[in-house]
Amino acid sequence: MIDPIEQFNIEKLFTIGHIGHQEIAFTNSSAYMFGSVALISLLMIGGVSGRHLVPGRIQSIAEISYEFVAANVRSIAGTEGMKFFPLVFSIFMLVAVSNVVGIIPYAFTISSHIIVTVALALLVFTTVLVYGLYKNGLKFFKLFVPSGIPLVILPLVVLIEVISFLSRPVSHSVRLFANMLAGHITLKVFASFVTMLGAMGVVGWFGAVLPLGMTVALTALELLVAFLQAYVFTILTCIYINDAIHPGH
């Protein structure tokens, strides 16, 4: 039997040290994080090292990635939002590259673990909260008081806005985590059908054609979802940063 959940297991590679009685271990998740950062570094450093007038493949990917994120930050958060470009670009590249790496058979997808996506979401939430209060002071709380609301229902609307703001890290993190988790489980299930039917002989080979086709189609879909989820996470980050820069509706 093939367990579709087994691919998400955290496995210790070696022990780094101890804090009290708590072991600090370097895991497969840590290794794939470092690997993703290394790939991103190679892409960006290699892309800008030559600076050819007619860019090659690596330089084109690096420039397209840069301009894509920069255009989204400018269009959503304005020119002032570009001070957060390094943060937004780093998050986009980490999520996108790690998602693509996770599609490789027997690889590990770091965004399929809620602790990773929650950490990224809390980083964005804390940045928005701290910068919003630093830049706007008490005016930041205008974010919770929409203009043009009748006084009678204003307390209810403010309560809804506060709950909505506090729940941002939840929706921000769960959306990415759930999509990657569900997609990889589905892909593993169909791939296991191919393996099991193929082991039944000639008859099983014919039966494996359909799940094999579904596996190929789901792999292509997962590749699209990998970039789409990175894009959605980035867009929401830009929207939240815009709220810190320009609070109020």
Image (cartoon, rainbow, N blue to C red):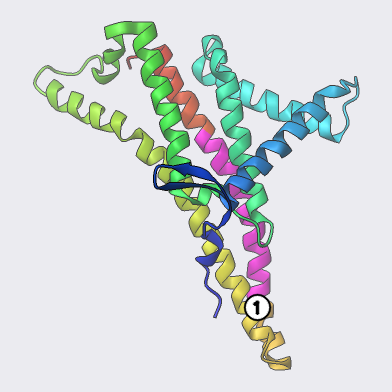
User: In the image, what residue type sits under mark 1?
Assistant: Val
Residue position marked by numbered label 1 in the rendering: 194
Query: What percent of the width, then of the height, locates residue 216?
Result: 68, 65
- Specify the quadrant that holds the N terminus: bottom right
Q: Is residue 210 left or right of residue 148?
A: right
Using residue 92 as the reference point, say whether residue 127 is left or right of it.
Answer: left
Residue at 43% x, 34% y: name it.
121
Magenta region: which residues? 210-233
Instruction: Specify the principal SS of the magenta part.
Output: helix
Dividing the picture into quadrants, the one containing residue 249 is top left
In the image, residue 149 lies at what x, y percent? 19, 18
Residue at the (31%, 35%) spot, across then down: 167
* Position in image of residue 126 (x %, y %): 39, 24
Residue 141: x percent and y percent? Answer: 27, 14
* Residue 83 visible, this orientation: yes
Q: Secondary structure at mark 1?
A: helix
Work out whether residue 86 or residue 211 is closer to the camera in this orientation and state it.
86
